[in-house]
Each structure stands twice: as structure tokens, then as C-alpha cells.
Amino acid sequence: MNLPGESSANLLGALALLAGSRMRASVNASIGASGALAEALVVLKDQPGVTAEWLGQVLGLTQPGAAHLVRRLREQGWVERRAGADARSRALHLTPEGASAAARILRARAEALTALLAPLTAEQRSQLDDIARTLLHDEVTDARSLAHLCRLCDRARCPRCPVHAGLQELSAD
């Protein structure tokens, strides 16, 4: 029997795949590369000075995977390594070319997602905002999980970030 509301989870799953596929294709085309490169550039734009280990954890990479990613970012001329907080660590920073690539990524992401939302009315967009805020609010437990969930977010477009608000409330308890 098909009761009303039973399709919500299924529809959400299909929508997540659609949004993810469109966003990934657009983002990858914007820099001519795929994989974790785009996510790394956006993370480093918002978190300059992190280590390769921290970046790898945020992106869900092994230590060798993170080292390979940093090498690829450096080969592209997008990232430079500087002295870190201690003698052994190296801080990652975007180069001007890397900052430009991150801006292209965020622009491509916004265009893809805006096109996906185009059929919605203003009221439907407002409802979607409310639903997304509710679903995202309690999803993080620490700064690293916040960085992971928002690794491709344009933080300037979401001044009242529900994910960050949820983390702040959790930290205040």
C-alpha cells in the first residue's frame, strides 16, 4: 500500500543524487579536474593554514591519499606549503591561482544549483530553506565534521548557517 508521505525518503535520496551529480559535473568542469581537488580548494579558501593531515581527514582521505592530493594541488600551482604551527608541520595556503580556481568552483556550483531550483516558486524556495535548515541543524559534532559537511559551501551565501549554529549550540551545552 502506498500511504501519503512514504515516498519522502525515496524522493529525498533521488534529489540528493541529482543535486550532487549536477554540482559535481559543473564544479569539475570549472577547473578541468575531478576528485577531491575542488573540495580541497574550497576548504583551503575557508580554512587557510591547515595541515595536509587535517585536510585529508575533512575530505575522508588516507594519509597517502592526502599527500597525493597536496602534491596534485601544488603541481597545478594552486597551493603552497608554508611553515606550520610547529617545526614538523606544514601549513597549506592557496596561491592567487588557487583562490581564482576556488572562486570558479563556487560560481559553477551556484549556477548548477540555482538552475536546479529554477522551477520552484518563491514560497517553495522558502519552504525548502526551512526544511534544509531543520535537517542540517544537528548534523555536526565538532569543527572537523562542520568542515566536512560544508566542504563545498559558499559560506558568503549562507550567513545564518544552520550547521554552524547547531555546532555552537552543542558547544554551549
Image (cartoon, rainbow, N blue to C red):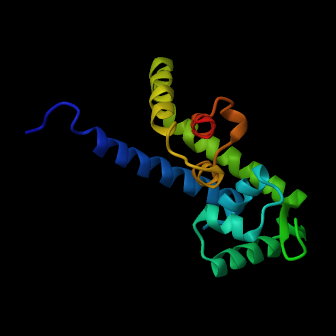
Q: Is residue 14 above or below residue 156?
A: below
Q: Position of residue 148 (x, y in %)?
A: 60, 55
Q: Position of residue 169 (x, y in %)?
A: 59, 34
Determine whether, in the image, residue 169 is placed left or right of residue 68: left
In what quadrant of the picture does the C terminus appear? Answer: top right
Q: Nearer the viewer, residue 21 or 145?
A: 145
Q: Position of residue 29 (x, y in %)?
A: 64, 59
In what quadrant of the picture does the N terminus appear? Answer: top left
Residue 107, image quadrant: top right
Q: Is residue 93 above or below residue 19?
A: below
Determine whether, in the image, residue 91 is placed left or right of residue 23: right
Q: Nearer the viewer, residue 164 or 156?
A: 164
Q: Would you say residue 77 is visible in this rendering?
A: no
Residue at 65% in and 78% down: 63
Q: Nearer the viewer, residue 52 or 80?
A: 52
Residue at 52% in and 36% down: 137
Q: Is residue 104 above or below residue 66?
A: above
Residue 56, image quadrant: bottom right
Q: Would you say residue 104 is visible in this rendering?
A: yes
Residue at 64% in and 52% down: 147
Q: Nearer the viewer, residue 107 or 46?
A: 46
Residue at 70% in and 79% down: 68
In the displayed orientation, state which residue is furthest to the front. 173
In the displayed orientation, state which residue is furthest to the left. 1
Residue 50, image quadrant: bottom right
Determine whether, in the image, residue 135 is placed left or right of residue 72: left
In the displayed orientation, state which residue is furthest to the top. 123
Q: How many marks?
A: 0
Q: Position of residue 84 (x, y in %)?
A: 88, 67
